[in-house]
Image (cartoon, grey):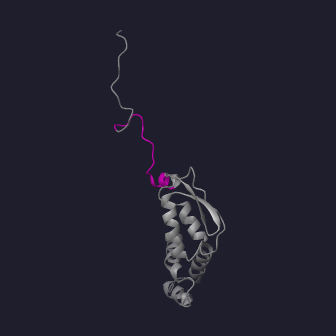
């Protein structure tokens, strides 16, 4: 099983992580797969569900204005996108976990994420859409 499939399985099992029938659900979802798949999914879930004490400072890393917030006893610098993602992911993960921290560090308006997706590619000076496309001015006749 590929890493993307393992991450997908782990993502689908987040809400069931603390339930009493978690092992049953995991067994059902990994049925027919090698035993290593079950172990890898469980390891990934344990990693992202681990309680987190890291602070988040997105100043200069996102396309938006960051403000200071004190959440769960920790001071964070978040923009509006990350603040909304925080509340959404706190409900999903059941508290401030490594998974929430990862989600906030990888919001859609993060400069690194935008560059990886190709949303923030600089325009070429010689392209037709360049803001520097102007008519040449002749200053002297030769």
Q: Foreground: 39 or 116?
A: 116
Q: Is residue 120 magenta?
A: yes
Q: Is residue 6 visible?
A: no
- Mostly what secondary structure, the magenta segment? loop
The residue that appears at 58% across and 66% down in the rendered structure is 101
In x, y percent, where is residue 54?
Answer: 65, 64
Q: Residue furthest top?
A: 142
Q: What range is drawn magenta here?
A: 113-128
Q: Is residue 131 visible?
A: yes
Q: Foreground: 83 or 137?
A: 83
Say if 29 sits above or below 63 in the image. below
- Disc tally is 0
| Quadrant (top left/top right/bottom left/bottom right) for the C terminus | top left
Q: Residue furthest right?
A: 53
**Is residue 129 rendered to the left or right of residue 99?**
left
In x, y percent, where is residue 115?
Answer: 49, 51
Say if 100 sits above or below 76 in the image. below
Q: Foreground: 59 or 132?
A: 59
Q: Quadrant of residue 99?
A: bottom right
In x, y percent, where is residue 106?
Answer: 53, 60
Q: Is residue 11 magenta?
A: no
In x, y percent, where is residue 59?
Answer: 57, 52
The residue that appears at 54% across and 70% down in the rendered structure is 3
**Is residue 131 rendered to the left or right of residue 19?**
left
Say if 122 sits above or below 61 in the image. above
Q: Quadrant of residue 43?
A: bottom right
**Is residue 136 rendered to the left or right of residue 67?**
left
Q: Foreground: 94 or 124?
A: 94
């Amino acid at each position: 099983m590929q890493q993307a499939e393992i991450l997908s399985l782990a993502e689908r099992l987040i809400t069931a992580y603390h339930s009493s029938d978690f092992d049953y659900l995991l067994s059902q979802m990994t049925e027919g797969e090698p035993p290593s798949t079950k172990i890898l999914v469980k390891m990934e879930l344990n990693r992202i569900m681990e309680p987190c004490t890291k602070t988040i400072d997105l100043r200069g890393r996102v396309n938006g204005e960051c403000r200071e917030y004190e959440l769960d006893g920790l001071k964070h610098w978040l923009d509006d996108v990350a603040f909304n993602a925080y509340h959404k992911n706190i409900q999903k993960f059941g508290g401030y976990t490594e998974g929430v921290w990862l989600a906030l560090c990888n919001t859609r308006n993060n400069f690194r994420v935008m560059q990886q997706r190709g949303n923030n590619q600089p325009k070429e000076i010689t392209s037709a859409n360049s803001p520097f496309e102007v008519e040449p001015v002749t200053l002297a006749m030769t």
